[in-house]
Amino acid sequence: MKTINLSEQNSVINLYLAELRDKKYQQNRLIFRKNIQRIGQLMAFELSKTLEYKTKTITTPLANIDIPLPKDDIVVATVLRAGLPFHEGFLSVFDHAASAFVSAYRMYTNREHTEVGIHTEYMASPSVKGRTLIIADPMLATGGSMAASYEALAKTGKPRSVHIACVIATPEGLDVLSQTLPDDATVWCAAIDPGMNKNKYIVPGFGDCGDLCYGEKL
């Protein structure tokens, strides 16, 4: 598995990520969602450089011109609900892609909220057989929900290639994915944080992405 950490190079992604982390900016859900979407757009652009291309002749009003165009058949999947603005960022770049949605969320399995289980109850997806599968989920903490989502989507067929996209990852989550994903899979992240607290939240992270995007849940 290959991991690409975009924070290792200076770009405007650092600005959007700083605002996502900042408690003052977090008070405005519109700005928070927009920054998640922007990072998705820029990450999709970087990912597009790794796709396969085929030259196509385009007819303009004045002449013909040969332009290399991506030939990958893409499915962009996301994990509900936190992944929705991130998903939209990817779709604004890969506007011909199909979409898939997985409901995979963590549930605490003890009273102290220190042990986590993954619950999957819904999926809507086309077949990913022979296609480029991109799973976009902002937070890669324990890696459990991402691994469960990949396994659920892979039941629809074997993808030609797999890309995992997240805003923030942890070493533990990356280790879980390295044991789950195909050897040639790629993980894209805007930052890798040192780890998690006892409640399995990424530190420093920025909190619960779904709540910050859409409000607190029961």
Image (cartoon, rainbow, N blue to C red):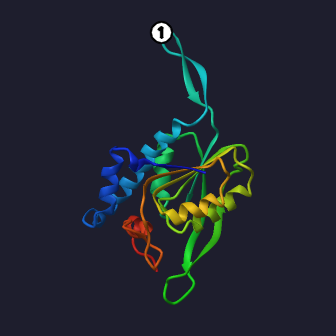
* Camera-nearest residue between 51 and 82: 51
Q: Quadrant of residue 208?
A: bottom left
Is 2 displayed left or right of 204 in the figure?
right
Residue under circle 1? 62
Q: Position of residue 31 (x, y in %)?
A: 31, 57
The residue furthest bottom is 111
Which residue occupies 54% across, 81% down?
115
Residue 102 visible within the image: no
Which residue occupies 60% across, 21% down?
56
Which residue occupies 42% across, 44% down?
42
Which residue occupies 66% across, 50% down?
183
* Camera-nearest residue between 11 and 55: 11
The residue furthest left is 24
Density class for disc 1 (Cα within 10 Å; few <14, some 14-19, many ≥20) is few
Is 94 displayed left or right of 206 in the figure?
right
Residue 119 visible within the image: yes
For residue 54, above or below residue 4: above
Q: Position of residue 192 (x, y in %)?
A: 44, 58
Total marks placed: 1
Amino acid at pointer 1: Leu
Does dot 1 land on a helix, a strand or a loop? loop
Q: Quadrant of residue 197?
A: bottom left
Q: Position of residue 202 (x, y in %)?
A: 43, 69
Q: Position of residue 72 (x, y in %)?
A: 63, 37
For residue 46, above or below residue 155: above
